[in-house]
Image (cartoon, rainbow, N blue to C red):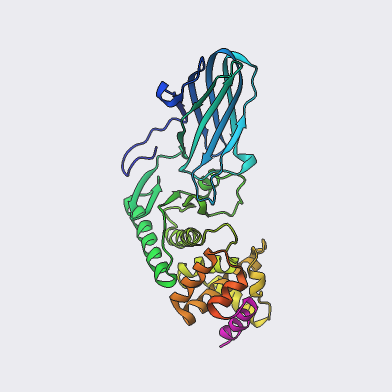
Amino acid sequence: MIKKAGQLILIAVLLLIPLSPATVRAADGLRMLESRVEVDFPMRVNFSLSVASDADITDIRLHYTVDRMRHAEVISEVPLDFEPAEMVDAGWGWDMRKTGGLPPGSRLSYWWTVRDAAGGELKTDPATVQVDDDRYPWRSLSEGLVTLYWYEGDDTFAHELMDTAQQALARLHSDTGAELESPAAIYIYAKSEDLLGAMIFPQEWTGGVAYTRFSTIAIGIPTDSLDWGKRAMTHELTHLVIHQMVFNPYNDLPTWLDEGLAMYAEGSLEPVFVNLLVKAINENKLITVRSLASPFSAYAEESILAYAQSYSLVDLLINNYGQSRMLELLNTFREGSGYDEALLKVYGFDMDGLNRLWLNYIVK
């Protein structure tokens, strides 16, 4: 769907996918006439079909599965409503407003099962649909496991972002030992409004998001905000790499480690974070490490402080104990270890012990 750099792109929103006789499993009297998929990004994916038989068709079911990181295969099944007849046109719409949206570039597989009153059954082979954001003329640039998509700005703009991504990956590997385990796609929207239009019920302040299970990042970077964009992209790319590495069915990372690694990857802490951290130290209003393991506050000042402290905690662990310990910690979390258990195994202290160690670290 998405063409290479420099090429114009024309993408039809309506995807008509007729099924040839070779794509269905033979059934007496049952005939698949047509199967259709319409993608209305980001709101809906509409599935429909036309099918005929020598007897009344009594049951039609859609089966679909989304291509993403998972611990077990998950197949959704939808029985369609229709009046039994020898020829049926039926369909079902996947409303993303009810389930949450898919990132651009997502892929899903689907197939149909049809039964009639004579006991016949027809099952189609899986077909693949790519869910693209067709509102923009995307161009692409690839290097290693990273593919960057953009539609506004020249080639230099894209190459600068790609260079930043590669440098971020190298630095992250040097600091933590973590690296990309599967290809990553980065979609660069020209402004935040374009990005918000690609999401379901987004927060107005959203500037970028890492869809870690899809190995996809979407971020709004105006051409005149490249410096901010480089830091933001590095932040989200770090989330993606770390989540690929520690993906397990038992436990997530503590928020302070997840966000702290992303902040650390950006480089030196920006003044707004430094100033709030110093203020909290002077006023004895620091957040405990145990509290920072949970999602951060929705209040701006408390959230900024949480990010600043998370950066400082990761700075302590990497600078005092080195890359090998951080790599061991991430691998321990990959095994599904609890927060305190992982820290005790790798460093010999739990979150309360880390809190005491960190307080001594920041007042030196």
Main SS of residues in magenta: helix
Identify the residue at image location x=46%, y=52%.
Answer: 215
Q: State left or right for residue 300 relative to residue 20.
A: right
Q: Position of residue 236 (x, y in %)?
A: 49, 59
Q: Where is residue 327? Give x, y as percent.
A: 46, 71
Which one is in front, 343 or 44? Answer: 343
> Which quarter of the rendered picture does the N terminus lie within?
top left
Residue at the bottom extreme? 364
- Please give the name of the residue rendered at 32% of the width and 44% of the height, measured from the top-left corner: 5
The residues colored magenta run 349-364
Q: At which x and y percent is residue 249?
A: 57, 57
Q: Nearer the viewer, residue 283 or 359?
A: 359
Residue at the image position 62 percent from the left and 26 percent from the top: 80
- Quadrant containing the C terminus is bottom right
Asked whether residue 265 is drawn in magenta, I would say no
Q: Nearer the viewer, residue 116 or 158?
A: 116
> Where is residue 255 drawn, in percent x and y?
59, 65
Q: Answer above or below: position of 362 versus 5.
A: below
Q: Is residue 362 magenta?
A: yes
Judge by depth and name the residue closer to the eye, 334 or 39. 334
Residue for point 53% across, 54% down: 207
Q: Residue furthest front?
A: 119
**Does residue 49 lie above or below 312 as drawn?**
above
